[in-house]
Amino acid sequence: MGKPLSIDLRERVIEAIDGGMSRRGAAARYGIAPSTAIRWDNERRATGSFAPKRQGGDMRSKRLEAHAGVIHAA
């Protein structure tokens, strides 16, 4: 998964949308996918924030730790 786009870019896109530009127009202006601008705007309307969410993380080790005794006994 790639790195999240900068907060500065997110702010500029949202400001353009708030200024009357369409979401697709703002996406074209800033060189991002229309779905990204739409998702950011929907997230901002629903929660009041458009900051990036946490990504990834170590998902496997929690499942493996539950079976650590069996794994080490083998």
Image: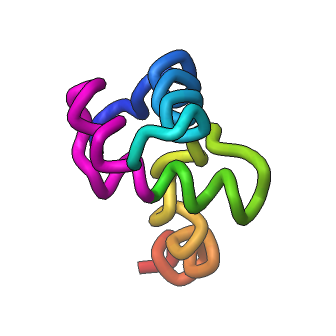
Q: Quadrant of residue 11?
A: top right
Q: Residue at x 29, y 40 (%)?
A: 25
Viewer-closest of 34 and 16: 16
In this rendering, is residue 47 above or below 62?
above
Of the pair 53 and 39, the residue shown nearer to us: 39
Q: Picture quarter containing residue 42?
A: bottom right
Q: Residue furthest top?
A: 8
Query: Quick check: 32 above or below 56?
Result: above
Percent x, y of residue 35: 30, 57
Quadrant for the N terminus, please. Answer: top left
Which residue is depicted at the point 29% across and 49% down? Answer: 24
Residue at x-position 60% and y-position 77%: 69
In the rendered image, residue 39, in percent from the top left (x then y), is placed at: 46, 58
Q: Is residue 25 magenta?
A: yes
- Side of 51 where 34 appears, left or right: left
From the top left corner, tell me how far across and down residue 50 is, in percent.
63, 43
Whether residue 29 is in magenta: the answer is yes
Residue sitting at x 51%, y 71%: 64
From the viewer's side, name the closer residue of 18 and 52: 18
**Which residue is more in the foreground, 53 or 42?**
42
Residue stretch in magenta: 23-38
Please tell me whether the stretch drawn in magenta is mainly helix, strand or loop.
helix
